[in-house]
Image: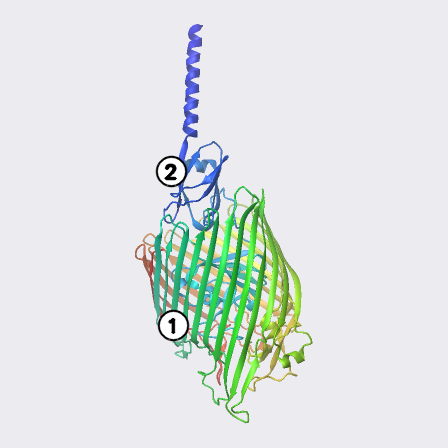
C-alpha cells in the first residue's frame, strides 16, 4: 500500500513538473521585431495591445510579449494603419521572431477588420516612376476606364470627365481638401493641371455621390494623395532623378526629389520641367502643341510625438507659351501657388481614435492672348489677365465603437475670380480703340459644410451612411452694368443636404454584391453664375452666367457585383442618375454678343429633367506567375428629357485590354495595351456636336529594373500610326474646322535613378 502511494506521488510530481515546464515554456517572454515588408527595416513607434499589456515598439521595431494562450495582438501605426492577428498567428510570429507590415494598411490577413472599406465603387491609380514624369495629371487619369478628358490643346490642360460628369460636377482635390479654380474662362488651367505630379503617390477615384467626406460631390470625387513622410532611425539623404524623351513632338521631361529623412523630420525639395513642340497626327498633319511647364516646391513632415505629425506642402506651377488651337487665345503664362498645412493625431484606448486637420491656399494668376494666332483678316488683338483664389480648411475626427465607427467633421472653401479682357481694335471705324470686358466681375463663392459617415461592420456585411449639409452663398463684387441690367439680384444663397446609404453583402469568400443610393445637390459654380459673355462652351457662342440658377440634384443608384478568386477578379457596376434642374444653356436671341465674330449669346439655364445611365465591367486575371491581363468595358448614355435629345459631351462606349508580363523576378515587365472606342452618334446637335468615328489604338512598352536604384522604360504609343481623335476633343479654330487629332506613332524612353 505504501509503495502504491509512493509511486502515485512520484507520478503526480512528474505531472506537476511537466505542467510547470509547459506553462513556463509558453509564458516566457518573446521578442518580436516589426519590420517593413518591402525594405526589411524595423518600424519604431508601433503601438501594440496584447492581453492587458500596451506599449510601443523600440527604435529597432522590437516588442516584448509574454505569450498568453488564446490572445489576439493588435497593432496601430500612422503609416501602416491598424491590424489584428489571431492567437495562432501570434505563435507563428513568436517562432519566426518577426512581423512584416505593408504601408497604408494594405496588410490584410483574414482576421483584420478593414479600417477604410470602400464606399460605393472606388478605383485607385498608383503613380509609377514613369507617371511622376508626366506634366498633366488629367492625361494620367485617362488610364482609369471611366474617365475621359476634354481636349482644347494637343498636350496640356486635359479636363477630366467622369461618367459624363464634368467641371464643377466633379470634386477634384489634393489630400482630401485643397482645390484650384481655373482662372482662365476657357479652362486652359483646370484643377488637374495644377497637381504636383512627382510628389503624388496615388489618385483615388470615388464614383457617384456616395462618399461625402471630401466636399460637395455631385458626380464623383478624384482625390490626389501626396507622398507620406518616411521617418528613419538615422538621418538619411534621399533622392530621385528621372528623365524621358518622346519622339513625336520632341517632348523632353525631367523631375527630381532631394532631401533628408530623420527620426523626427522628413524634408524634401522637388522639381519637374517639361517642354514640347508641335506633333504629327496619323494623317501626317502638324498639330500645334507647344508647351513649357515648370513645377517646384518642398514638403516637410515633423513627428511631434509617437502619435502626432504635422506637415507643410508648398508647390509652384509655371506654364508658359502653351498652344490651344481650339480656342481663340493661347496661354501666355500661368503662375500658381499651392500651400497647405496639416496636423494628424491618433489616440489609443479612447472612443476618439484619430483627428486630422488641414488648411490651404491656392493662388492662380493666368495670362492669355491671341498674338500668335494666324487670323485673316486680323480685326482685333486681345489679351485676358485673370486670377482666382481658393482658401479653406477641413477638420475630421474618427470615433470607434464596438461594431462601428464614425467620421465627422467640417470643411470650408472660399473661391473668387476676377479679370478683364482687353481688345485693341485694328480695323474699321473703331481702329485704335481699346475696349475692356469685365469677364469675372470679381465674383466669389463661400461654402461651409458639415459631414458625417457611419460605418457598420457585421460578419459578411458592411453598411455605410454618408451625409452632409452645405451652406453656399455667392455674389459679384464688381458687376458689369450690362450684366446688372439683365438680373435684378446678383447675390444668391442656398442651403442643401446630400445623403448616401448603401452596403455590401459578402455571400462567401468569392462573391459580393453592393447597393448604393445617393442624393447630392450642387450649387452653380462661378462660371455658371457670373461669366460675362465669354465663349467658354463647345460652340463659339458667348456664355452668359445666371445667378438665378437653382441647384442641380443627382439621384443615383449603383449596383456593384464582385467575383474574386486567387487568380481572377471580376467587377460589374450598373448605375443610373436621375437628374433634376440639371445646368445647361440655351440661346438668347434677344441679347447682342460683345464681339462681332460670335454668332450669339447662350445663357446658363436649368433643365428640369435629364437622365444618365451606364455600366462598367472590369476583369483582371493572373494566367500564370509570368502573365496576366486586364479587360474593361465602359458606357454612359445621357439624355435631355426636356428637349428629347442626348446630353452633350458624353464619350462613346470604350473597350480596354492590357496584357502584362512579369519576368526575371519582377525585373522585366512588358505590356501591350489595346483600346477601341465605338462610334459616337448620340450627339447634341443644338450644341454644335458632330459624330465621332470609331477607332482602335495599340501601345506597347517594356520596363526594366536594372538594379535597386536604376530603372528604364521604353515603348511606342499608337503603334500602327492610327489617325484618330477623341469625341471630347474640340475643333481647331480655322476657316475649315478640324478636330484636334491625337498624336501619331511616337517612341519614348524613360530613365530613373532612385534612392528613396
Residue 96 marker: 2
Q: Which mark is residue 427?
A: none
Q: In which quarter of the image is residue 323?
A: bottom left
**Residue drawn at the location 61% of the way across and 59% of the way down:** 449
Label 2 element class: helix
Between residue 62 and residue 119, name the one nearer to us: 62
Above or below: residue 331 compared with residue 461: below
Residue found at x 38% / y 38%: 97
Q: Under tag 1, what secondary structure?
A: strand
* In-front residue for pair 491/468: 491
> Around disc 1, counting alpha carbons within 10 Å, would you say few (fewer than 14), some (14 to 19), or many (20 or more)?
many
- The answer to whether marks 1 and 2 mark residues whose Cβ atoms lie closer than 8 Å is no
Q: In this view, does 653 lie to the left or right of 588?
A: left
Residue 269 percent location from the top left of the image = 39, 61
Q: Quadrant of the N terminus?
A: top left
Residue annotated with mark 1: 275
Whether residue 189 is visible, yes or no, is: no
Locate residue 678, reporting x and y percent.
50, 69
Outermost residue, front side: 304
CA–CA distance in space, label 1 to label 2: 52 Å
Q: Quadrant of residue 701?
A: bottom left
Amino acid at each position: 500500500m505504501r509503495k502504491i502511494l509512493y509511486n502515485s506521488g512520484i507520478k503526480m510530481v512528474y505531472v506537476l513538473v511537466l505542467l510547470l515546464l509547459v506553462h513556463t515554456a509558453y509564458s516566457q517572454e518573446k521578442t518580436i521585431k516589426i519590420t517593413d515588408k518591402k525594405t526589411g527595416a524595423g518600424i519604431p513607434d508601433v503601438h501594440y495591445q496584447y492581453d492587458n499589456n500596451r506599449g510601443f515598439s523600440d527604435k529597432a521595431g522590437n516588442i516584448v510579449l509574454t505569450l498568453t494562450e488564446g490572445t489576439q495582438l493588435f497593432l496601430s501605426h500612422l503609416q501602416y494603419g491598424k491590424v489584428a492577428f489571431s492567437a495562432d498567428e501570434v505563435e507563428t510570429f513568436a517562432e519566426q521572431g518577426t512581423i512584416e507590415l505593408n504601408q497604408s494598411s494594405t496588410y490584410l490577413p483574414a482576421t483584420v477588420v478593414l479600417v477604410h472599406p470602400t464606399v460605393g465603387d472606388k478605383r485607385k491609380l498608383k503613380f509609377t516612376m514613369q507617371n511622376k514624369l508626366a506634366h498633366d495629371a488629367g492625361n494620367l487619369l485617362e488610364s482609369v476606364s471611366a474617365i475621359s478628358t476634354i481636349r482644347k490643346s494637343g498636350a496640356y490642360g486635359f479636363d477630366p470627365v467622369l461618367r459624363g460628369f464634368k467641371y464643377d460636377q466633379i470634386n477634384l482635390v489634393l489630400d482630401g481638401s485643397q482645390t484650384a479654380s481655373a482662372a482662365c474662362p476657357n479652362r486652359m488651367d483646370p484643377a488637374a493641371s495644377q497637381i504636383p505630379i512627382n510628389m503624388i503617390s496615388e489618385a483615388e477615384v470615388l464614383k457617384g455621390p456616395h462618399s461625402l467626406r471630401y466636399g460637395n460631390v455631385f458626380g464623383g470625387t478624384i482625390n490626389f494623395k501626396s507622398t507620406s513622410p518616411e521617418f528613419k532611425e538615422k538621418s538619411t539623404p534621399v533622392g530621385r532623378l528621372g528623365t524621358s524623351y518622346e519622339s513625336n513632338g520632341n517632348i523632353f521631361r525631367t523631375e527630381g526629389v532631394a532631401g533628408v529623412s530623420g527620426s523626427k523630420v522628413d524634408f524634401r525639395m522637388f522639381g519637374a520641367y517639361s517642354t514640347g513642340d508641335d506633333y504629327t497626327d496619323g494623317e501626317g498633319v502638324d498639330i500645334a502643341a507647344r508647351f513649357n511647364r515648370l513645377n517646384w516646391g518642398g514638403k516637410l513632415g515633423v513627428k511631434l510625438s509617437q502619435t502626432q505629425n504635422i506637415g507643410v506642402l508648398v508647390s509652384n506651377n509655371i506654364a508658359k507659351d502653351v498652344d490651344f488651337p481650339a480656342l481663340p487665345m493661347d496661354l501666355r503664362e500661368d503662375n500658381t501657388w499651392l500651400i497647405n498645412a496639416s496636423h494628424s493625431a491618433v489616440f489609443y484606448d479612447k472612443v476618439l481614435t484619430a483627428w486630422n486637420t488641414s488648411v490651404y491656399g491656392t493662388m492662380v494668376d493666368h495670362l492669355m492672348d491671341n498674338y500668335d494666332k494666324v487670323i485673316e483678316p486680323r480685326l482685333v488683338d486681345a489679351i485676358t489677365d485673370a486670377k482666382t483664389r481658393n482658401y479653406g480648411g477641413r477638420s475630421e475626427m474618427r470615433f470607434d465603437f464596438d461594431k462601428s465607427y464614425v467620421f465627422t467633421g467640417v470643411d470650408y472653401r472660399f473661391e473668387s475670380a476676377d479679370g478683364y479682357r482687353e481688345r485693341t481694335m485694328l480695323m474699321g471705324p473703331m481702329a485704335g480703340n481699346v475696349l475692356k470686358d469685365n469677364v469675372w466681375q470679381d465674383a466669389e463663392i463661400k461654402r461651409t459644410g458639415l459631414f458625417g459617415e457611419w460605418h457598420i461592420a457585421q460578419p459578411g456585411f458592411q453598411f455605410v451612411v454618408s451625409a452632409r449639409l452645405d451652406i453656399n452663398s455667392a455674389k459679384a463684387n464688381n458687376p458689369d452694368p450690362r450684366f446688372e441690367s439683365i438680373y435684378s439680384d446678383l447675390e444668391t444663397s442656398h442651403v442643401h443636404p446630400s445623403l448616401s446609404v448603401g452596403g455590401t453583402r459578402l455571400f462567401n469568400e468569392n462573391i459580393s454584391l453592393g447597393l448604393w443610393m445617393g442624393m447630392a445637390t450642387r450649387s452653380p459654380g462661378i462660371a455658371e453664375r457670373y461669366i460675362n459673355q465669354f465663349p467658354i462652351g463647345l460652340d463659339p457662342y458667348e456664355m452668359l452666367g445666371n445667378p438665378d440658377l437653382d441647384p442641380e440634384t443627382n439621384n443615383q443608384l449603383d449596383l456593384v457585383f464582385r467575383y474574386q478568386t486567387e487568380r481572377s477578379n471580376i467587377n460589374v457596376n450598373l448605375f443610373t442618375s436621375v437628374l433634376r434642374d440639371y445646368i445647361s444653356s440655351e440661346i438668347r436671341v434677344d441679347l447682342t454678343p460683345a464681339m462681332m465674330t460670335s454668332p450669339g449669346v447662350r445663357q446658363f439655364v436649368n433643365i428640369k429633367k435629364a437622365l444618365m445611365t451606364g455600366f462598367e465591367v472590369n476583369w483582371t486575371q493572373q494566367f500564370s506567375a509570368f502573365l496576366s491581363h486586364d479587360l474593361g468595358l465602359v458606357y454612359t448614355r445621357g439624355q435631355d428629357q426636356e428637349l428629347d435629345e442626348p446630353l452633350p459631351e458624353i464619350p462613346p462606349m470604350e473597350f480596354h485590354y492590357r496584357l502584362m508580363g512579369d519576368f526575371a523576378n519582377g525585373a522585366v515587365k512588358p505590356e501591350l495595351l489595346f483600346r477601341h472606342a465605338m462610334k459616337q452618334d448620340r450627339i447634341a446637335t443644338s450644341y454644335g456636336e458632330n459624330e465621332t468615328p470609331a477607332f482602335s489604338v495599340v501601345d506597347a512598352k517594356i520596363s526594366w529594373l536594372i538594379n535597386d536604384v536604376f530603372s528604364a522604360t521604353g515603348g511606342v504609343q499608337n503603334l500602327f500610326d492610327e489617325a484618330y481623335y477623341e469625341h471630347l476633343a474640340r475643333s481647331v479654330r480655322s476657316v475649315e474646322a478640324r478636330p484636334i487629332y491625337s498624336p501619331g506613332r511616337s517612341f519614348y524612353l524613360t530613365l530613373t535613378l532612385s534612392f528613396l
